Amino acid sequence: MAMTQLQIMLVRESWEVARKEPLALKILFYERLFYLAPETRAVFQGVGHSKILIRNLQAIVDRLEVLDDSTYFIPCLADEFVPMAVRTAHYSVIGEALLWAIEKRLGGRWNQQIAGAWQTLYDTLTAVVRKVAA
């Protein structure tokens, strides 16, 4: 699922706002994730995962035009999550927590277009991760 130029622009602009305080974004994400799926707490223990979150999100946003199976970093992303026992059942709740956290960071700037752009991005990523994990 390719992103449109408008979606790419919306993700990049909103990411610039959301990432200004990476600690706040990480806290929002993990608190929401653990609320929605408490069993994921055991999978995402330790400070290393919170560093990986922001680093991977930045890498993804930097390469929005080339999100496909041949892109090197997406299989690497899958390789980081598969050994951590992230099950495919967790993908939707991880996406929900991520989009929720970004929405909270954006506040009144969040709208349906931005939500749709991030959802398209997340759907694209999970499709590739599912292929790599299979």
Image (cartoon, helix red, strand yellow):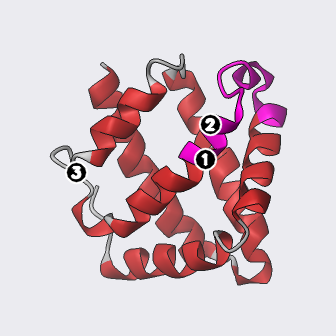
Q: Residue at x 79, y 33 (%)?
A: 34
Residue 124: say if magenta: no
Report the quarter where the N terminus lies. bottom left
Q: Identify the amino acid type marked 2.
A: Gly
Mark 2 lies on a secondary structure that is: helix
Report the quarter where the C terminus lies. top left
- Height in image: 25 above or below 11? above
Mark 1 lies on a secondary structure that is: helix
| C-alpha span from label 2 to label 3 | 26 Å
Give the total of numbered labels. 3
Q: Nearer the viewer, mark 1 or mark 3?
A: 1
Would you say 82 lies left or right of 5 here?
right
Q: Which mark is residue 111?
A: none
Outermost residue toward the left in this view: 70
| C-alpha span from label 2 to label 1 | 5 Å
Q: Which residue is mark 1?
A: 51
Q: Which residues are magenta?
A: 34-52
Q: Residue at x 44, y 22 (%)?
A: 82
Q: Which residue is mark 2?
A: 48
Give residue 29's position: percent from left, percent from top.
73, 49
Magenta region, main secondary structure = helix
Q: Which residue is mark 3?
A: 68
Q: Nearer the viewer, mark 2 or mark 3?
A: 2
Q: Residue at x 20, y 44 (%)?
A: 69
Q: Identify the amino acid type marked 3.
A: Asp
| C-alpha span from label 1 to label 3 | 24 Å
Query: Where, by quadrant of the figure, is residue 131 drawn?
Result: top left
Discs 2, 1 touching: Cβ within 8 Å:
yes
Give residue 104's position: percent from left, percent from top.
78, 66
Q: Identify the amino acid type marked 1.
A: Lys
Would you say 134 lies left or right of 51 here?
left
Q: Quick one: label 2 or label 3, which is nearer the N terminus? A: 2
